[in-house]
Amino acid sequence: MMGKISEAFRLSLRFPQNLVWVLWLAFPLYGFIASNVLLPPDDGYSRQVVMASLAMNLSAVEPLVFMVFNLLGVIPMTYALLVLFDGKEQPMPAWPFVILSFFAGAFGILFYVALRRWGHAVEGPKSRLQEQLDTRMVPAILLAVSILLVIVGAGGSPQSYLDLWQTKPLVHIMTLDLVILLLVLPFLAMDDMRRRQVDGSAWRVLVVALPVFGVLIYLLGRPKLLYAPH
């Protein structure tokens, strides 16, 4: 396995995968500097946001903060519906990084995204988990949740969110996390289109123009993946 990983790392240093490495390294470095130097210390607002989300208390925090914080639960699931279909052609399994992404966001998943082999047919038979995920039910639920979150966020104030972004470490870092995840997500969707032999520029425009909704709509409409035996 180590030989496979070292070869994958060598190949990942090429453009554009090397840009993913830059994001993976720069995000935690900037987050540390922002949290410890650029912004005031956390005053308990992070706990307030977490508790409001767990209790579904929409009045406890700025609606846009509620929306972004909870979208950071939807987006790792969207990543999962793409990378968990990688097969034996990859240097390592995707699932540990998917789990890590729910806690560490972009830093958790981008290591795998940078290292994975792009543009390859999937090798090996489907696992039981992949069979269960290759349906329309999960993306339909994620799409419905995303729409509800955007409706909630529409009741917020951009100026209030900007003020919080400038003063609250959680809001600052999670906004950056969201942006990075949305930048990379369409490229994973387009790689999934190649391996499922989905032909259509309209899909590509959709996933780039609407990184959350477009990708989820694609996941609703994509054909089942046919695995090549190896």
Image: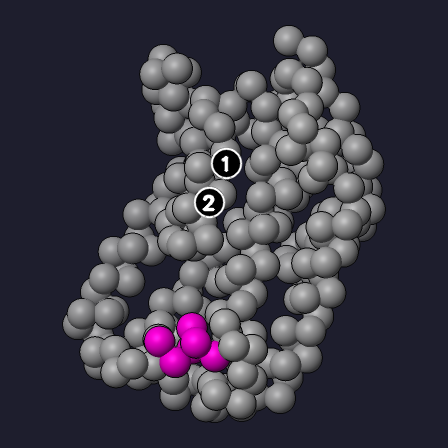
Identify the amino acid type marked 2.
Answer: Ile
| Dominant SS type (magenta) | helix
Image location of residue 111, percent across then percent down: 40, 39
Element at label 1: helix
**Structural crowding at the residue carrying mark 2, measured as other residues with C-alpha within 10 Å and reported as few (<14), some (14–19) or many (≥20):** some
Describe residue 143's horizontal placement relative to residue 66 as left or right.
Answer: right
The stretch in magenta equals 47-52
1 over 47 or under it: above or below: above
The answer to whether residue 229 is seen in the rendering is yes
Residue 203's disc is none
The residue where tag 2 is placed is 99
The reply to whether the magenta stretch includes residue 49 is yes
Identify the amino acid type marked 1.
Answer: Trp
Image location of residue 88, percent across then percent down: 56, 19
The residue where tag 1 is placed is 95
Image location of residue 229, percent across then percent down: 69, 11
